[in-house]
């Protein structure tokens, strides 16, 4: 069972690179949705099944695998965009930075004073690498919708960290995190909609030209 969990975490690493390397926003959204669904399976595979773990898995899969991608899909249809044409950083450089960040995640995880049962696992490096991938998406993309996917990837990284403490964390903590995430996506959707109405573009770099 743990080997299957490791395979899912390796898949998370690969999905990070796919998101960094694609210019098609709908593909990035689908990949992030698949990443969320894969992580939603991990709690049920990692521990003995309980109602607590069932709620975590079901909530993760439903919200991040279906509801949020559906909302983002509607957003890109309403604003009529398909690609991230001119990111702040090119796709090859950002993937190279992502590779360096992933290597750093493994090196840094080895230096942390982890509990004995957590040493040698992929959870910590996967969490750090996913967090850094989300940060790279936020700083390298111009489109607001692409930055939302970066925010989702960062939340996936936080969730991976939380998997190490699944049995100790009450269900309300995870429910609150999912609620915060959902509210954040609604807010970003409103912002994207207003930007597209006022400026006929959702390129956030153009906001620097605003004047009174």
Image: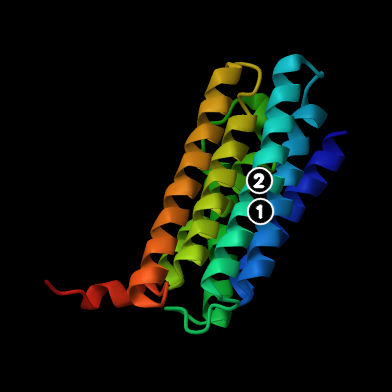
Residue 200: x and y, percent? Answer: 40, 77
In the image, 166 versus 78, the foreground residue is 78
Say if 37 sits above or below 211 in the image: above
Residue 18 appears anywhere in the view: no
Which one is in front, 15 or 93?
A: 15
Q: Quadrant of the N terminus?
A: top right
Q: Residue at x 48, y 47 (%)?
A: 186
Q: Residue at x 28, y 72 (%)?
A: 207
10 Å crowding of disc 1: few (<14), some (14-19), many (20+):
some
Crowd band around label 2 with a 10 angstrom C-alpha radius: few (<14), some (14–19), many (20+) = some
**Rendering quarter of residue 158:** top right
Tell me the number on the disc at residue 70. 1
The answer to whether residue 71 is above or below residue 178 is below
The residue at the point 81 percent across, 18 percent down is: 48
- The reply to whether callout 1 and callout 2 are in contact (CB within 8 Å) is yes
**Local SS, label 1:** helix
Which residue is at the front of the view, 206 or 153?
206
Residue 117, quarter of the rendered image: top right
Quarter where residue 5 is shown? top right
In-image side of 199 versus 42 (left or right): left
On screen, residue 52 above or below 124: above
Q: Which mark is on residue 67?
A: 2
Vertical placement of residue 183 versus 145, above or below: above
Whether residue 69 is visible: yes
Question: Relative to residue 203, is residue 137 drawn left or right?
Answer: right
Which numbered circle lies on residue 27? none
Judged from the image, the secondary structure of the residue bearing numbered disc 2 is helix
Q: In the image, what residue occupies the spot 50% across and 57% down?
A: 148
Q: Give coordinates of residue 41: x percent, y percent.
A: 78, 37
**Residue 212 picture location, percent across and down:** 11, 71
């Amino acid at each position: 069972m743990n080997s299957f969990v490791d395979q899912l975490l390796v898949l998370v690493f690969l999905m990070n690179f796919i998101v960094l390397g694609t210019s098609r926003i709908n593909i990035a959204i689908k990949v992030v949705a698949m990443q969320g669904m894969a992580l939603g399976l991990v709690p049920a595979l990692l521990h003995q099944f309980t109602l607590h773990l069932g709620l975590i898995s079901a909530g993760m899969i439903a919200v991040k695998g279906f509801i949020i991608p559906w909302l983002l899909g509607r957003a890109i249809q309403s604003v009529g965009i398909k690609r991230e044409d001119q990111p702040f950083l090119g796709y090859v450089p950002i993937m190279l930075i992502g590779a360096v960040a992933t290597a750093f995640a493994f090196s840094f995880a080895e230096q942390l004073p982890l509990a004995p049962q957590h040493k040698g696992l992929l959870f910590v490096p996967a969490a750090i690498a996913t967090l850094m991938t989300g940060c790279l998406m936020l700083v390298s993309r111009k489109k607001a919708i692409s930055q939302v996917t970066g925010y989702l990837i960062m939340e996936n990284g936080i969730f991976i960290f939380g998997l190490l403490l699944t049995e100790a964390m009450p269900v309300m903590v995870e429910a609150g995190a999912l609620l915060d995430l959902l509210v954040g996506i609604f807010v970003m959707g409103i912002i994207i909609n207003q930007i597209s109405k006022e400026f006929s573009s959702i390129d956030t770099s153009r906001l620097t030209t605003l004047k009174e």
